[in-house]
Amino acid sequence: MKFTLALKNLPFEPQEKQIIFVESTYNEDVNQFISDNYERIRTYCSNKEYEFCYLPKLTVKALDADVLFYNVPYAELQKAEEPFTSDYLLRFMVNPKNKDLIPPSLLYYKSWSRTDKEETIFQGMSVTDQEETPTLEEIFFMRLDEIFDSFMIHGQPKFSFGPDKDKPRIRFQKMPASEKEEEQKEESRLKEIFDGMQMMIDIDDGICKGGEDDEAYRGYSASCEIDVDDKFDEISRMIADEVKERIELLKCRGIDMLTLIQYIKDQEPLSHLHITKDFRIFLPDYGNIEIEMTPLPKAIFFLYLRHPEGIPYKYLPDYQDELMELYILLKSTTDRHKMRESIEDVTNPLSNSINEKCARIREAFITKFDEHLAKNYYISGKRGFAKKITLPRVLVVWEK
């Protein structure tokens, strides 16, 4: 039997490469088969770049310790785990009255089948309808092969199953040439607009092109400040490739998020932020991890910590002296002239330098723990408004 299953309000983001075993009623033969062949099934799926998920074996102990800490840095690891049962996902059914109709099955998800943010459509294949094959082992691996084959054909989704296995499968055709040409024209038009907007901004060094006597400079200098503020979200969220790769490895996705549910508190605690006499930064409630930054980003971070009301970019020049004082405390060099140049550059509202430093500050936190907690510690803010650090200042401790 092949079917579709609508689930709603899932506590995790489904992933296409995960194949999940579910059942409404415990089937001893199937569960014994999976238990006896668990590593074999996992390896078979892994060789096809898929992950087989058997909920009774889904425990936090199976997660890498670094992954657990990154997502839930406050976790109490001594807490006893409650094992999941294979019918766990069925409690999220849109039509729970049909729960008993679900046989032992393999579920898989296709992103293009999603209907809305709350409702998710899974495809399912029973592993107990054995009319075609004599053994459970044969039908189980045959179903896995069908799932592998169903996903791609020449780079396009191949088919999805309707509620009835006898109904025709829906095929997705390639985009007609005429529509593709229209899409390419639209992309070219948008690129021209974007290039025009960038005409007076040098992304590499973050300053307006042209001199003060340049007519174009006079005409666009007022808009440069707006453009720099516009680019706050884009540039401040840029991170180095190696950092991005590390974060991708540490993020918990898909069904694995279930292992964290019993550790994630309704009101997730924020850690105190402790700044030592020698200006090192620690988060004592998150395993006392240290947040490391180079001197200039750290000076900017301390400046914004001092000002919970926030600082708009256009007023940054008013804070040059205060920022310079912080920078001197953090940097060992005695070349004050060069340091002053750095301060003037980063407080220039027409320069992207401040956005780049904010990116480094954000990177320092999100390399240690997940964004949903880290966002309380780095500089953020909407376009046209003051940028600030939202962490309550009662959690900030400065050693004296």
Image (spheres, rainbow, N blue to C red):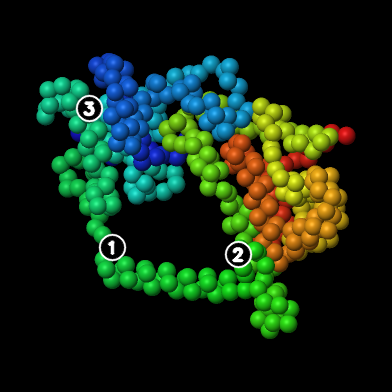
Mark number, residue 140: 3
Q: Residue 251 in the image: x percent, y percent? A: 51, 37
* Amino acid at pointer 3: Phe
137 up-or-down from 153: above or below = above
Mark number, residue 304: none
Mark number, residue 175: 1
Determine the secondary structure under disc 2. loop
The residue under the point 48% across, 26% down is 63
> Which residue is most to the bottom?
215
Label 1: how many residues lie within 10 Å, few (<14), some (14-19) or many (20+)?
A: few
Q: Nearer the viewer, mark 3 or mark 2?
A: 2
Q: Nearer the viewer, residue 373 or 8?
A: 373
Q: Residue 4 in the image: x percent, y percent? A: 28, 40
Determine the secondary structure under disc 3. helix
Please give the residue where the numbered disc 2 appears in the rendered image.
Answer: 203
Disc 1 versus disc 2: distance between alpha carbons?
Answer: 35 Å
Label 2: how many residues lie within 10 Å, few (<14), some (14-19) or many (20+)?
A: some
First in sequence: mark 1 or mark 2?
Answer: 1
Disc 1 versus disc 3: distance between alpha carbons?
Answer: 35 Å
> Which residue is most to the right?
400
The C terminus sits in image quarter: top right
Q: Is residue 335 visible?
A: yes
First in sequence: mark 3 or mark 2?
Answer: 3
First in sequence: mark 1 or mark 3?
Answer: 3
The N terminus sits in image quarter: top left
Position of residue 317 in the picture relative to residue 158 (left or right): right
Q: Nearer the viewer, residue 335 or 61?
A: 335
Q: Nearer the viewer, mark 1 or mark 2?
A: 2
* Amino acid at pointer 2: Ile
Q: Residue 184 in the image: x percent, y percent? A: 37, 69
Q: Residue 165 in the image: x percent, y percent? A: 18, 40
Q: Is residue 31 visible?
A: no
